[in-house]
Amino acid sequence: MQRSTFNKIRNLIYDISGISLSEDKYALVNARVAKRMRVLEIADHKNYLEYVISDDSGIELQHLMDVISTNVTSFYREADHFDYLRSALKQWTESGLRRLRIWSAASSTGEEPYTIAIEVRELIGQRPMDVKILATDISSAVIKKAIKGEYEEEKVAPISRGVRAKYFTMVKTHNGALYRAKDELKRMLSFRMFNLTHQPFPLRGPLDVIFCRNVMIYFDRDLRARLVKEFHRLLKPKGYLFVGHAESIAGMSEGFKVVKPSIYIKEK
């Protein structure tokens, strides 16, 4: 791939998604774009870029976003966040909370929002409670997988056997076992394609909790600041924002107080 084509592709990705691809991502972009080129039987990178731009349907642009997006996730990733969430939810429910709204803003293939749903269900049991968990991602491919809610055995390994048996049905296939999320989890979840660069967000608050983990590291400072401002607008007073352990909103956290590294509370 010529450097000029690489630069045009990364500028396109930035304009669409806010993902900032540095020079050292050349090999990664080259390899991932090649996947789409093989599918389309296009041999030249410049011709592929022209194909993306000329596709008025936007379908190939979405395919490009799907292959470029990094979708590394797991159940109970950064487990201390879920320990803290459990404690906060317990406190809220004991204080009479009966309506809960949570947003998983970069939900990938669904492990994060399903983990949240498990924690909520474990806490409230069968008590009546109005719970909605919104799970969003820019990639249509990962949203489709998340909606299915089917995971290989190694994927569900972080979930204890007892909890796994409660909330997943094991399905035997010729490739081994799949674990399918049960309806009592799925009923709490809504999955939607969502672009975090399009602000203000078309969401109705107030939200109790926002998870936006391990995605802002791909954004420039200006976009991160605008995201944090939107999260503040949508959260209720004393609502929580969780970011990735490798992320910080230092210098853009007006209206938030640090609870502990990577966990913030809206002050008012």
Image: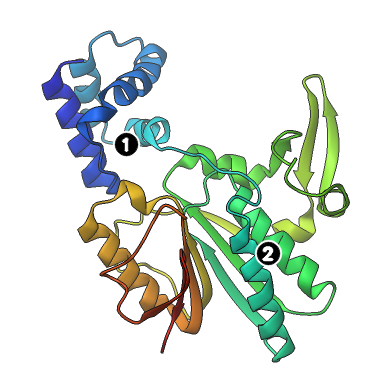
Residue at image location 56% in from the left, 43% down from the top: 73
Is residue 187 visible in the rendered structure shown here? no
Instruction: Name the amino acid type tagged 1.
Output: Ser
Q: Which quarter shows the N terminus?
A: top left
Within 10 Å of disc 2 (Cα), the crowding (few <14, some 14-19, many 20+) is many
Name the outermost residue toward the left: 4
When asked about the image quadrant of residue 145, the answer is top right
Residue 61 vs 216, above or below: the answer is above
Tag of residue 248: none
Q: Which quarter shows the C terminus?
A: bottom left
The earlier-in-sequence mark between 2 and 1 is: 1
Q: Residue under circle 1?
A: 57
Residue at image location 61% in from the left, 44% down from the top: 74
When asked about the image quadrant of residue 122, the answer is bottom right
Q: Residue under circle 2?
A: 188
Instruction: Name the amino acid type tagged 2.
Output: Met
